[in-house]
Image (tube, helix red, strand yellow):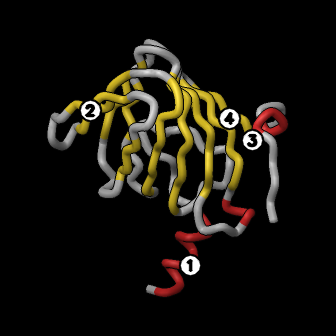
Amino acid sequence: MIVRKLKDIRKTDKNVRSKGWASARMLLKDDNMGFSFHVTTMFAGAELKMHYQNHLESVLVLKGTGTIEDLGTGEVHRLEPGVMYALNAHDEHIVRPETDILTACTFNPPVTGREVHDESGAYPADPDAQKVAAKAA
């Protein structure tokens, strides 16, 4: 059983900050759960363009308001407590927090812990998974 406290994670290097967001990585690849779990805050006024090409993500909004725009369809959805969105097709999107938005997120495959978005808005692929795929090919 794994038991962790958010307040403790926030004091470690598992609390990753980047432009417009901070993410407490509660479960990571090394925990061998098959996914990673994060408590992430997206800061008011940010415009976060993301495109997870190597991961699937689901997000539950716990606090705050804003919008998410699907760049593939142009649809804009309201974000508020109780709304969940899942990027099940590696959807390119922009989150625009009106207030700080507190979320609970999962990533599949799990992240290793230090990832931040690259220039395309993605987290890099897991190098270990790429080695396995290369050997299988």
Indicate the secondary structure of the residue bearing disc 4: strand
Who's the residue at 68% across and 44% down the image?
Answer: 25
Quarter of the image for the N terminus: give it.
bottom right
Q: 110 above or below 129?
A: above
Three-letter code for the amino acid on which mark 1 is drawn: Val
Residue 21's disc is none
> Marks 3 and 2: in contact by CB < 8 Å?
no
Helix, strand or loop for disc 3: loop
Q: Which residue is mark 4?
A: 16
Give the spatial CA distance, label 4 vs label 3: 6 Å
Report how far apart the C-alphas of labels 4 and 1 lie in the structure.
Answer: 27 Å
Q: Secondary structure at mark 1?
A: helix
Residue 31 is situated, as x and y percent measured from the top left of the image, at 74, 63
Residue in the picture at 71% in, 47% down? 26
Residue 132 got which mark? 1
Amino acid type of disc 4?
Val
Instruction: Check the image and report above or below for 133 versus 12.
Output: below
| Label disc, if present, on residue 14 of the rendered structure | 3
Pointers 4 and 3 in contact (C-beta within 8 Å): yes
Q: Residues within 10 Å of mark 2 (few under 14, many from 20)?
A: some
Residue at the spot of label 2: 77
Image check: 16 left or right of 6? left
Place of residue 67 in the rendered image (x, y in percent of width and height, measured from the top left): 33, 26
